Image (tube, coloured by chain):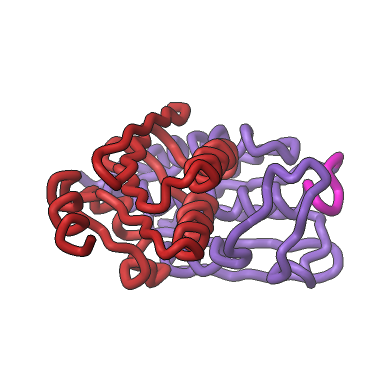
């Protein structure tokens, strides 16, 4: 099992970086080209949700994303440390820059994209684990 | 790729051309533009997404917010989009039933003309 771990500050600009890294590793791990858009979108959704939650509750804390090549599956875990009980409630950060019009939509999108999703949440944060099939030898099927 | 926004009016319709990525970083700019257009009395908006490379739920939220604002003035917000990867997120979230989605600006203008 090979793991890449990425830690980033809760800034919206970093979400794109996380998407790019996840897509590059997914391709290298052997996720088919047809699924790469889904990986990119799902990872972006998970990271966006984490960034928004951190900006409200703990802007100084980093977000962690782990990317694993796990026996024929490409697995991504996004972990934040923001209390997640009020995720479905609209939140208004001090700078007013990230008021979600439809809170909770991101999780619905992830559930629709990844065929294997596990969401665990609580007072100490949320963990979203998702995975996609990958070719065992790490070469994407064409 | 960053987000590029442009807009122009044709008759009673304001066409918003969007190019690039609409995500948590760039979506606030689109939201500000839509709010500004509505505040200036543009209540019939057509968002051309043919050059959008990426759209996430933040972008969807901005579009839904724009739709709510124009509807408050009996207006409309419709989309031009033919890219499967963008249409997929509308289908997953059920928003294909909320937005009018057209294959081209001309097709949308024709439909808008009929509805006026």
- Give A117 or B79, whichever is nearer the viewer: B79
* Residue B27 seen by the camera: no
- Chain A tint in image: purple
- Chain B tint in image: red
Q: Position of residue A110 (x, y in %)?
A: 50, 63
Which residue corresponds to the image point at 43% horizontal and 37% vertical from the top-left? Answer: B21
- Give A76 or B28, whichever is nearer the viewer: B28
Which residue corresponds to the image point at 30% horizontal and 52% vertical from the top-left? Answer: B79
Which corner quadrant of the image does residue B113 belong to? bottom left
Q: Position of residue A127 (x, y in %)?
A: 69, 62
- Give B28 or A86, whichever is nearer the viewer: B28
Q: Which residues are magenta?
A: A55-60
Q: Is B60 left or right of A37, judged from the image as shown?
A: right
* Residue A56 seen by the camera: yes
Q: Is A122 left or right of A110, judged from the image as shown?
A: right
On whether residue A102 falls in the magenta region, the answer is no
């Amino acid at each position: 099992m090979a793991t890449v771990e990425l830690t980033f500050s809760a800034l919206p600009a970093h979400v794109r970086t996380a998407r790019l890294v996840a897509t590059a590793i997914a391709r290298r791990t052997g996720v088919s080209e047809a699924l790469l858009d889904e990986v990119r979108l799902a990872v972006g959704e998970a990271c966006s949700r984490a960034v928004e939650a951190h900006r409200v509750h703990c802007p100084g804390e980093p977000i962690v994303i782990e990317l694993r090549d796990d026996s024929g599956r490409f697995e991504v875990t996004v972990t934040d440390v923001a209390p997640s009980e009020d995720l479905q409630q609209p939140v208004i950060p001090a700078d007013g820059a990230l008021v979600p019009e439809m809170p909770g939509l991101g999780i619905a999108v992830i559930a629709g994209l990844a065929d294997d999703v596990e969401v665990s949440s609580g007072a100490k944060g949320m963990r979203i684990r998702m995975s996609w099939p990958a070719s065992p030898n790490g070469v994407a099927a064409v | 790729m960053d987000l590029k926004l442009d807009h122009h009016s044709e008759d009673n319709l304001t066409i918003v051309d969007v190019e690039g990525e609409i995500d948590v970083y760039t979506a606030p700019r689109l939201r500000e533009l839509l709010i500004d257009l509505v505040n200036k009395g543009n209540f019939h908006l057509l968002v051309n997404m043919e050059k959008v490379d990426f759209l996430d739920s933040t972008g969807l939220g901005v579009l839904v917010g724009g739709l709510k604002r124009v509807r408050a003035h009996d207006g409309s917000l419709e989309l031009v989009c033919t890219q499967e990867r963008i249409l997929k997120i509308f289908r997953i979230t059920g928003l294909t039933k909320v937005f009018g989605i057209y294959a081209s600006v001309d097709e949308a203008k024709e439909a808008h003309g009929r509805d006026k």
